Image (cartoon, rainbow, N blue to C red):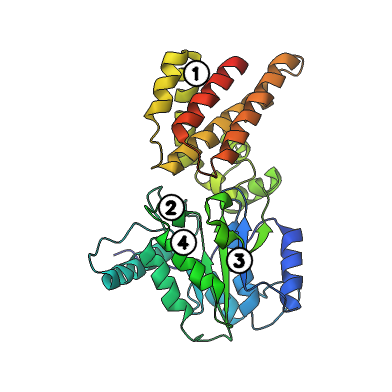
């Protein structure tokens, strides 16, 4: 039988200025008790939150971030610190009894953490995964615990927008709101979101927002080199398509390619005229599978960005059209963070793209 060896999390890449500011705030004991890291998918928000957890619990108490050598740092890096609780979207528990649903959520979350411990090059959770009410009840249970090793405990809730998007009602978000209103004094809570507008306004009003920007292409390139991706035109393409997101670069063999295929189909429908793109828009589920909708928009942005890069510089008319089309996709992607009907949005976008392309 093969023996599996746990791996440490990948080193944090980029965000040097932001990390310097966060380390200074932590050293001054002024890090907010409840915060929200906001930024595009895959730019390292959850990894950065775990870096903050490592800094908060580091036994060396260095002024410029975690030492990386003490017991606390090593435990955070291999996802075994009992005072760091990382909540990741999981399938909705199926147990009929609410208390058993919490136990099932605990087991499912443990499986995901174990998988990430074995392979830190993970991809985004499936579109149906969420933070159900059972997951938030589990979070409440862990928040009430006394720290086991450190003086405080840290909770990271990744993809926090899935409390609303994947729920038939805002029960999970309301339960989370109760935790945020009066968190225990020994607890630091960090949420991350790519679509903060999908969070309840009452949640957004109770957090300190921290912006996490896209990474330079050279940082994405360095990361791929570090994990052993050989230099090649294919790697260069992965860097281009990643658009400053290490997560996108990691998933380029599946998620990005699937989004590009969906984008190609949509663009073909746009070229086919109103009859074609109307059917394509109606084929998009109106409220479920919002992850598929935003993935399609991401794929369209990647395709159009490639056209901008490849467009002959002397053909300024075509270049301006591609840039305008890219802008329309980006605006739709931004609007998709709210209560936007995907079918109507795609119909409007298709008409705009047809005029531009």
Instruction: Assign a secondary structure to mark 4.
Output: helix
Instruction: Assign a secondary structure to mark 3.
Output: loop
Q: 10 Å neighbourhood of mark 4: few (<14), some, or many (≥20)?
A: many
**Residue under the image location 53 percent in, 67 percent down:** 156
Alpha carbon of mark 3 to alpha carbon of mark 2: how far? 26 Å
Q: Which residue is mark 3?
A: 206
Alpha carbon of mark 2 to alpha carbon of mark 4: how far? 19 Å
- Callout 4 touching callout 3 (CB < 8 Å): no
The image quadrant where one finds the N terminus is bottom left
Q: 10 Å neighbourhood of mark 1: few (<14), some, or many (≥20)?
A: many
Which badge, 1 or 2, is on the more N-terminal residue? Answer: 2
Image coordinates of residue 203 in percent, x first then y, are 56, 62
**Residue under the image location 64 percent in, 83 percent down:** 59
- Callout 3 touching callout 2 (CB < 8 Å): no
Q: Which residue is mark 4?
A: 173
Nearer-the-camera pick, 182 or 40: 182
Q: Is residue 83 left or right of residue 279?
A: right
Image coordinates of residue 149 in percent, x first then y, are 53, 86
Which badge, 3 or 1, is on the more N-terminal residue? Answer: 3
Q: 10 Å neighbourhood of mark 2: few (<14), some, or many (≥20)?
A: some
Q: Is residue 21 left or right of residue 171?
A: right
Instruction: Assign a secondary structure to mark 1.
Output: helix
Image coordinates of residue 103 in percent, x first then y, are 31, 72
Nearer-the-camera pick, 9 or 204: 204
Q: Which residue is mark 1?
A: 270
**Residue 125 numbered tag:** 2
Q: Which mark's residue is nearer the viewer, 2 or 4? A: 4
User: In this rendering, is residue 288 above or below 90?
Assistant: above
Which badge, 2 or 4, is on the more N-terminal residue? Answer: 2
Q: Which mark's residue is nearer the viewer, 3 or 2? A: 3
Q: Which mark's residue is nearer the viewer, 3 or 1? A: 3
């Amino acid at each position: 039988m093969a023996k599996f060896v746990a791996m440490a999390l990948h080193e944090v890449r980029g965000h040097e200025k932001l990390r310097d500011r966060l380390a200074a705030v932590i050293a001054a004991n002024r890090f907010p008790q409840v915060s929200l890291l906001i930024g595009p998918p895959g730019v390292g928000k959850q990894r950065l939150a775990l870096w903050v957890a490592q800094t908060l619990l580091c036994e060396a108490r260095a002024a410029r971030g975690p030492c990386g050598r003490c017991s606390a740092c090593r435990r955070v890096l291999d996802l075994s610190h009992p005072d760091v609780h990382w909540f990741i979207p999981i399938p909705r528990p199926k147990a009929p009894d609410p208390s058993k649903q919490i136990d099932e959520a605990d087991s499912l979350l443990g499986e995901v953490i174990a998988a990430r411990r074995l392979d830190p090059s993970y991809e985004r959770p499936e579109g149906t995964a969420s933070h159900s009410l059972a997951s938030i009840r589990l979070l409440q249970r862990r928040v009430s615990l006394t720290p086991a090793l450190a003086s405080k405990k840290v909770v990271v809730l990744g993809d926090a927008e899935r409390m609303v998007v994947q729920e038939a009602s805002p029960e999970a978000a309301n339960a989370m709101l109760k935790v945020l209103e009066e968190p225990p004094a020994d607890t630091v809570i960090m949420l991350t979101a790519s679509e903060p507008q999908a969070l309840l306004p009452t949640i957004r009003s109770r957090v300190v927002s921290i912006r996490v920007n896209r990474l330079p292409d050279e940082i994405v390139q360095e990361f791929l080199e570090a994990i052993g991706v050989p230099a090649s035109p294919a790697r260069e393409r992965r860097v281009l398509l990643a658009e400053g997101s290490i997560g996108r670069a990691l998933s380029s063999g599946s998620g990005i390619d699937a989004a590009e295929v969906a984008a190609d189909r949509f663009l073909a429908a746009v070229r086919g005229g109103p009859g074609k793109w109307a059917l394509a828009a109606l084929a998009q589920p109106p409220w479920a599978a919002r992850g598929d909708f935003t993935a399609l928009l991401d794929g369209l942005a990647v395709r159009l960005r490639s056209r901008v890069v490849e467009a002959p510089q002397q053909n300024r008319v075509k270049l301006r059209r591609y840039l305008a089309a890219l802008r329309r996709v980006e605006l739709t992607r931004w609007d998709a963070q709210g209560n936007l009907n995907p079918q109507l949005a795609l119909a409007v976008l298709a008409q705009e793209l047809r005029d531009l392309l």
